[in-house]
């Protein structure tokens, strides 16, 4: 086995996935940036959730907004719903794993807030329930998916934004999700700071 060639192929595949996605995703990413920025300017917050690697992505996104991305600026209201082990285990134990995010959305979300819902398959049960809860609270949903969007793609409303990576391999979708998250952070900063 030629490991160097295998590594190089992974780099090439990852780059190609991103290049394949740009034409399809640039406009909805720009719309998501504007929606998120308007939410934050108007005193709203962004709640983010996902499972596994997508949980890490939701935390990464919240950290970039609360701290900073690349430029110093005021703190921005973002909460990853994946971090409080007591809440997650209490809800998972007392209710069900499918409700670990939806109950938090109902408790923390308000009209005008945004749910950033991340699922590579578009079929994660607890993300679907979180989106339902967000809709109940008149929140906008920005869904970050792949593999055609799954059930999440089908349940989004007209005011929601679907950022669906045109790929089927989970690793490539996750890598592109991270780039999308960085694009969101960069765009929010550009609008807030007036950066060209």
Image (spheres, helix red, strand yellow):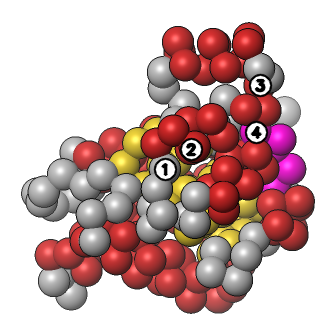
The residue beneath circle 1 is 109
The residue beneath circle 4 is 126
Marks 3,4: beta carbons within 8 A = yes
Marks 2,1: beta carbons within 8 A = yes
In the image: residue 142, left or right of residue 127: left
- Counting labels gives 4
CA separation, marks 2 and 1?
5 Å
Q: Nearer the viewer, residue 191 or 2?
A: 191
Q: Residue 63, position in %: x, y?
A: 34, 42
Q: Which residues are magenta?
A: 121-126
CA separation, marks 2 and 3?
14 Å
Q: Residue 113, position in %: x, y?
A: 45, 61
Neighbour class for label 1 at 10 Å: few (<14), some, many (≥20)? many
Residue visible at 22% across and 45% down in the picture:
67
Q: Where 146 sits versus 18, above or below?
A: above
Q: Counting residues from the N terminus, which is met first, the one under dot 3 or under dot 4? A: 3
Residue visible at 21% across and 87% down in the picture:
196
């Amino acid at each position: 086995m030629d490991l160097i060639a295998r590594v190089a192929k992974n780099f090439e595949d990852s780059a190609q996935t991103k290049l394949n996605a740009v034409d399809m995703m640039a406009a909805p990413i720009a719309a998501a940036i504007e929606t998120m920025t308007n939410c934050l300017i108007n005193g709203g917050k962004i709640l983010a959730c996902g499972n596994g690697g997508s949980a890490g992505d939701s935390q990464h996104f919240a950290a970039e907004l609360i701290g900073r991305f690349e430029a110093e600026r005021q703190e921005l209201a973002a909460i990853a719903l994946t971090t409080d082990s007591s809440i997650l285990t209490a809800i998972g134990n007392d209710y069900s794993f499918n409700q670990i995010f939806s109950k938090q959305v109902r408790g923390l979300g308000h009209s005008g807030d945004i749910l950033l819902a991340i699922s590579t398959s578009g079929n994660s049960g607890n993300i679907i329930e979180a989106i339902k809860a967000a809709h109940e609270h008149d929140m906008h949903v920005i869904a970050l998916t792949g593999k055609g969007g799954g059930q999440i793609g089908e349940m989004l409303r007209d005011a929601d934004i679907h950022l669906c990576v045109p790929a089927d391999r989970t690793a490539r979708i996750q890598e592109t999700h991270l780039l999308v998250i960085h694009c969101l952070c960069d765009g929010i900063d550009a609008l807030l700071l007036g950066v060209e």
